[in-house]
Amino acid sequence: DVKVTQSSRYLVKRTGEKVFLECVQDMDHENMFWYRQDPGLGLRLIYFSYDVKMKEKGDIPEGYSVSREKKERFSLILESASTNQTSMYLCASSFNLQTYNEQFFGPGTRLTVL
Amino acid sequence: AQSVTQLDSQVPVFEEAPVELRCNYSSSVSVYLFWYVQYPNQGLQLLLKYLSGSTLVKGINGFEAEFNKSQTSFHLRKPSVHISDTAEYFCAVTRGNSGTYKYIFGTGTRLKVLA
């Protein structure tokens, strides 16, 4: 069965801290995505990666960076967390860049920045 | 550029009643259309998708959707809902050819099934 896992379900951090969100997929997918989900705004793409060490900015990359050192793992980094980054973060993966492919989602990490 | 509109942010419905969740999109090119469901405290999972061919698409859990090109709509329907269908539903669109990877998601519709 296809699986995308995220390192934490809930996370509480303080303003200014460096935060790492980890995502692992076991499907040998080429592409991995990080979304942010906020009420009334739906899902917004932060970054995606189409290969190891390759990344592209999504719609809201400011304040975030990513790392993909291994095919199965994609990390989202908040260099200096701020309260407006309190949100639900969803990781997803897909087989390749063909847009008809389904995206498989992890359960999400609810991050609170105090 | 593509966009997706889900006008209903919340839809309450009684158990065993039919339901329709509305999705309209705008695009100047051909599109692929998707419905995803998010159960409480879970990630999204695919309900169904339209790529081409028959405009009526059947998905999991008894859901179906109809692609209407002239009205640029892709409404989701179920003839009889269960309590377990309580969830948030997201419509999404992608370009129907190569050139972009991006999904555009709607803002979601929260379906609340009442006993």
Image (tube, rainbow, N blue to C red):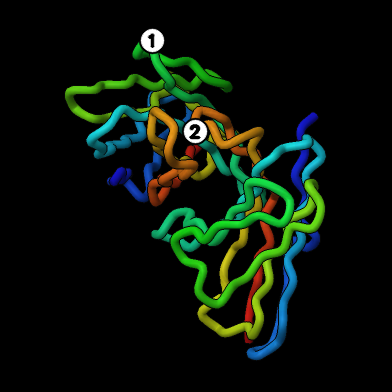
Q: Tell me the amino acid under the disc marked 2.
A: Thr
Question: Which of A51/B46 is in front?
Answer: A51
Residue that numbered label 2 is attached to: A99
Q: Residue at x 65, y 48 (%)?
A: A32
Question: How far apart in space, not on screen, are marks 1 and 2 (Cα)?
Answer: 17 Å
Q: Is residue B111 visible?
A: no
How many numbered circles does the render carry?
A: 2
Residue located at (50% from left, 74% from top): A62
The residue pinned by badge 1 equals B53
Looking at the rendered structure, the kind of residue marked 1 is: Gly
**Residue drawn at (39%, 51%), measured in percent from left and top?**
B107
Q: Residue furthest left?
A: B70
Which quadrant holds residue B99? Answer: top left
Q: Quadrant of residue A82?
A: bottom right
Please name whichever residue, B103 or A37, is drawn nearer the observer in this view of the structure: B103
Q: Secondary structure at mark 2?
A: loop
Residue at mark 1: chain: B
Mark 1, other Cα within 10 Å: few <14 / some 14–19 / many ≥20: few
In this rendering, position of residue A106 left or right of residue A102 = right
Q: Nearer the viewer, mark 1 or mark 2?
A: 2
Q: Describe residue B39's horizontal placement relative to residue B53 as left or right.
A: right
Left or right of A1, for residue A40: left
Percent x, y of residue B85: 54, 34
Any part of residue B14 in sight: yes
Query: Dot 2: within a 10 Å radius of its alpha carbon, few (fewer than 14), some, or many (20 or more) residues?
Result: many
- For disc 2, the chain is A
Q: Residue A94 in the image: x percent, y percent? A: 64, 37
The residue positioned 46% from the left and 44% from the top of the image is B102
> In the displayed structure, would residue A17 be above or below residue A51?
below
Spot occupied by residue B53 in the image (x, y as percentages of width and height): 38, 10
Q: Which mark is residue A45?
A: none
